[in-house]
């Protein structure tokens, strides 16, 4: 009966879990189907809505094209724009529109006036000039106007929903920027009535259970089923333009949907930040006109639209709500994002019908499962009684009556597990009989075993006496201590060291037998052996015959059958003589080390002498390179003079040719006198700089103003610097007078500046800057050129430093270094600056003027 009740309980659990499982699976399947249907329905609705918005965008683009084409003829605009804004069948959709010129794009005040039409109550388009009045704050500050200037040509910016301040009608505006010669000249607009959008969403699910509503780009309600637009205008407008966050506060069941909307906006803003076309600083003049909570979303819309990433409507999320305010039951909410407008279209469908269908199915399946299980239990009860309950009952009765013949009959009549059980009982009975017979034989064997054990004990006693004889004859200390700290075995040597008889030692604690210090060390090592179950060795001094002897002590664990430590064995070897020999060897070894240290000091001195010879060799090679390469540098300087003159004169001749051409154009009246006079003044200034550089040449020393010389050089290099987009600045005193040969300082300054201009920058680099610093320290002149160019790799810098050190000539800088050392007793230094500084490289020339 217990077995049957257990089966009944298991059957009940199976039925309940099966029904629950079927209900859960079917619910999820039907909900998935409903979600798929919602996605298809939502895509159809957004596709229809996108067709409507595309027509509005095309209309706004057409008006924009008219504005760009006829911006100078207002009469043509007044005749064309109303015709475009009045297509048949769209009077209730398009509230108005027009052209709004940018106030900063025209010099003529007449062109600043807007051309705007709005529908009257009779449905006719009427031109509105309210924005053109002087008291008007200006349409260029409106939310539908300011962001449009950051949109590409023929693209539409859909504003947030608002109430027009002059018509007092809730609407959304589609704005298209107008451009002419890459200049923003205004905006064309088309105004859409929110009432028309509300009617579209209200009838979007005709014939289906559910509803559709929408949010604008800033999550304000564009439509909702409970809003009646035929109500008083102030009430309908207040509800229609309500932010969805406030709407969710009023309808608490929409809070999960509001959280989903905030999450979608956060992801949208984050995605726009990854690859943005405009920075926040570029858009600050536009976004500061909007509320702070709308600025981040507006920035993201402008950046996303510039990249044109969203082309078709996208599914952006699905949410289940427990209690919808319209249906008052659980619903599935599906969200779509519209391209261009960035509206969120939200589809709401109830799921009560799904749950009712699942409940009906699970009830019918549950009834069938119960009937099947009851029939199966009855059949199982009959089969179980016949197969094993009745045979087991007969076997139990036979065992209670000691009827082995019945059990034997049962085992022979069946071949299943019951027959095997009967055979096992029969076999066990036979084994018991055999076991009783063997007990007598066992008793006899035990008596024989007892005699054998007595003989073994006699042998063990003899072995123990032999072991004691071996222990006592050994010259080492041997003893065994239990884990409790008592001595259980000692040899004669231990008794001699302890100065006690064996009977006074066995069973006594170690600290009562050995000196306290020896006992303490012994106990510490015993603990390590017991804990680690490993042998160990150490040295210890023990007094024997009134002398200290050094012993090598080895301890080892003694384990029982369970591998537990029961005792610790100790063997101590007297190594005093060996220790004294070891000390003698150690002294000899230390003497050998001292001798080796003396040899090492000699080797170190030899290495220092070798290093000094190597340095002297490098200095000798450097001086030789300096003498040889100086002659090359002199020849190179002589060859450089024509090149320097050519590089300074060629741009002047080229400018002279252009000046002559302009003079010809001036003579024909094609050029203004102001222009040619300015060019003539510039050319005269260049010739003055060139005259200073060329007239001051000579081999005799005379006073030179280095500041003035640097200004002349940079002035003549200005055309080349402008061509390479390089800005050069100088940092000097007002005057810096030195005595010397003019040509030498000209060559020095020209070389170091020209080298930086030619080699320091990548071709495509922007913001190229050079700073020249002239300083005088006592009798030294230091010229330092800084640049923010590509810098020098470490390997190349090390190579240049080595070439400068060894006076080799391989380029302009090494040539200048050899010349400075030979002619001025100066030096050249190249430095790579830190990353965080303004400049990357500094080239410095130090010249002695004493």
Image (spheres, grey):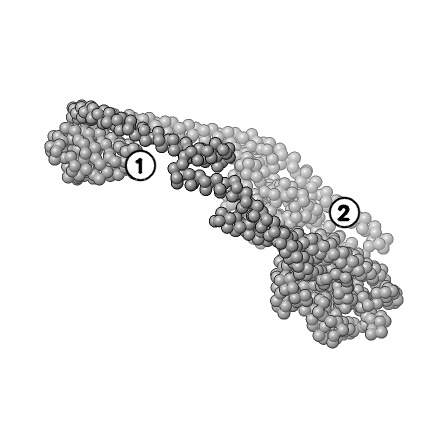
Could you tell me residue 827's position as x and y percent? 53, 40
Q: Nearer the viewer, residue 222 or 736?
A: 222
Residue lying at 17% horizontally and 33% vertically, measured from the top left = 542
**Residue 656 bears which disc, if any?**
2
- Helix or strand or loop: what does disc 1 sit on? helix
Q: Nearer the viewer, residue 615 or 780?
A: 615
Q: Is residue 791 above or below residue 101?
A: above
- Helix or strand or loop: what does disc 2 sit on? helix
Labels 1 and 2: the sequence-earlier one: 1
Q: From this viewpoint, is residue 115 visible?
A: no
Residue lying at 19% horizontally and 37% vertically, measured from the top left = 486
Q: Nearer the viewer, residue 609 or 670?
A: 609
Q: Is residue 376 above or below residue 165?
A: above
Could you tell me residue 399's position as x and y percent? 40, 38
**Residue 532 bears which disc, if any?**
1
**Residue 45 bears which disc, if any?**
none
């Amino acid at each position: 009966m217990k077995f049957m009740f257990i089966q009944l309980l298991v059957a009940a659990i199976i039925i309940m879990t099966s029904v629950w499982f079927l209900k859960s699976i079917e619910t999820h399947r039907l909900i998935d189907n409903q979600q798929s249907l919602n996605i298809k329905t939502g895509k159809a609705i957004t596709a229809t809505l996108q067709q409507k918005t595309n027509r509005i965008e095309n209309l706004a683009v057409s008006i924009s094209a008219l504005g760009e084409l006829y911006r100078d003829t207002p009469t043509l605009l007044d005749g064309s724009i109303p015709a475009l804004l009045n297509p048949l069948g769209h009077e209730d959709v398009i509230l108005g529109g027009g052209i709004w010129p940018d106030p900063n794009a025209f010099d003529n005040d007449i062109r600043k006036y807007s051309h705007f039409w709005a529908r009257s109550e009779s449905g006719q388009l009427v031109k509105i000039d309210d924005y053109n009045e002087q008291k008007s704050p200006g349409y260029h500050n409106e939310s539908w106007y300011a962001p449009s200037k950051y949109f590409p040509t023929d693209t539409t910016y859909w504003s947030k929903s608002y109430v027009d301040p002059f018509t007092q009608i809730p609407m959304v505006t589609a704005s298209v920027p107008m451009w002419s010669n890459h200049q923003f000249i205004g905006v064309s607009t088309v105004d859409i009535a929110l009432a028309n959008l509300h009617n579209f969403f209200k009838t979007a699910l005709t014939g289906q259970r559910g509803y559709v509503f929408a949010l604008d780009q800033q999550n304000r309600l564009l439509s909702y089923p409970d809003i009646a637009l035929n109500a008083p205008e102030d009430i309908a407008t207040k509800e229609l333009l309500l932010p969805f966050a406030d709407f969710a506060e009023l309808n608490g069941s929409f809070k999960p949907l509001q959280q989903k909307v905030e999450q979608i906006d956060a992801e949208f803003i984050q995605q726009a930040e990854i690859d943005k076309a405009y920075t926040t600083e570029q858009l600050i003049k536009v976004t500061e006109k909007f509320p702070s909570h709308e600025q981040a979303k507006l920035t993201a819309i402008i950046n996303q639209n510039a990249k044109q990433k969203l082309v078709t409507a996208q599914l952006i999320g699905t949410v289940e709500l427990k209690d919808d305010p319209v249906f008052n039951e659980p619903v599935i909410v599906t969200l779509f994002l519209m391209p261009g407008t960035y509206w969120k279209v939200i589809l709401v469908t109830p799921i009560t019908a799904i749950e009712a269908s699942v409940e009906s199915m699970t009830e019918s399946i549950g009834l069938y499962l119960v009937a099947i299980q009851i029939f199966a239990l009855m059949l199982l009860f009959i089969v179980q009684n016949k197969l094993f309950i009745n045979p087991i009952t007969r076997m139990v009765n036979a065992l209670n009556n000691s009827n082995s013949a019945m059990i034997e009959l049962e085992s022979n009549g069946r071949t299943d597990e019951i027959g095997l059980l009967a055979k096992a009982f029969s076999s066990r009975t036979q084994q018991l009989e055999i076991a009783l017979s063997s007990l007598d034989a066992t008793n006899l064997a035990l008596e024989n075993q007892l005699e054998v054990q007595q003989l073994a004990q006699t042998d063990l006693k003899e072995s123990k006496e032999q072991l004691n004889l071996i222990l006592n004859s050994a010259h080492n200390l041997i003893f065994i201590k239990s884990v409790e700290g008592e001595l259980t075995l000692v040899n004669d040597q231990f008794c001699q060291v302890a100065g006690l008889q064996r009977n006074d030692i066995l069973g006594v604690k170690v600290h009562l037998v050995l000196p306290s210090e020896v006992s303490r060390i012994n106990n510490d090592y015993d603990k390590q052996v017991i804990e680690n179950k490993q042998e160990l060795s150490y040295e210890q001094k023990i007094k024997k015959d009134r002398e200290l002897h050094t012993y090598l002590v080895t301890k080892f664990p003694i384990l029982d059958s369970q591998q537990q430590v029961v005792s610790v064995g100790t063997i101590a070897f007297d190594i005093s003589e060996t220790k004294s020999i070891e000390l003698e060897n150690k002294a000899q070894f230390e003497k050998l080390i001292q001798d080796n240290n003396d040899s090492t000091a000699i080797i170190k001195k030899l290495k220092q002498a070798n290093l000094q010879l190597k340095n002297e060799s490098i200095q000798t090679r450097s001086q030789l390179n300096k003498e040889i390469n100086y002659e090359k540098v002199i020849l190179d300087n002589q060859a450089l003079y024509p090149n320097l003159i050519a590089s300074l004169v060629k741009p002047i001749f080229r400018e002279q040719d252009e000046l002559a051409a302009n003079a010809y154009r001036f003579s024909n009246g094609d050029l203004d006198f102001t222009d040619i006079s300015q060019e003539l003044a510039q050319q005269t200034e260049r010739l003055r700089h060139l005259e200073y550089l060329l007239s001051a040449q000579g081999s005799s020393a005379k006073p030179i103003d280095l500041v003035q010389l640097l200004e002349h050089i940079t002035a003549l290099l200005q055309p080349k610097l402008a061509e390479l987009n390089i800005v050069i600045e100088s940092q000097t005193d007002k005057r810096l007078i030195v005595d010397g040969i003019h040509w030498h300082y000209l060559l020095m300054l020209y070389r170091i500046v020209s080298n930086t201009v030619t080699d320091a920058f990548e071709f495509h680099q922007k913001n190229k800057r050079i700073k020249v610093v002239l300083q005088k320290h006592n009798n030294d002149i230091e010229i330092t050129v800084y640049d923010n160019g590509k810098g020098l790799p470490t390997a190349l810098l090390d190579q240049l430093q080595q070439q400068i050190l060894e006076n080799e000539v391989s380029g302009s800088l090494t040539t200048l270094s050899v010349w400075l050392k030979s002619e001025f007793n100066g030096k050249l230094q190249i430095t790579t600056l830190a990353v965080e500084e303004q400049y990357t490289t500094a080239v410095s020339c130090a010249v002695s003027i004493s």
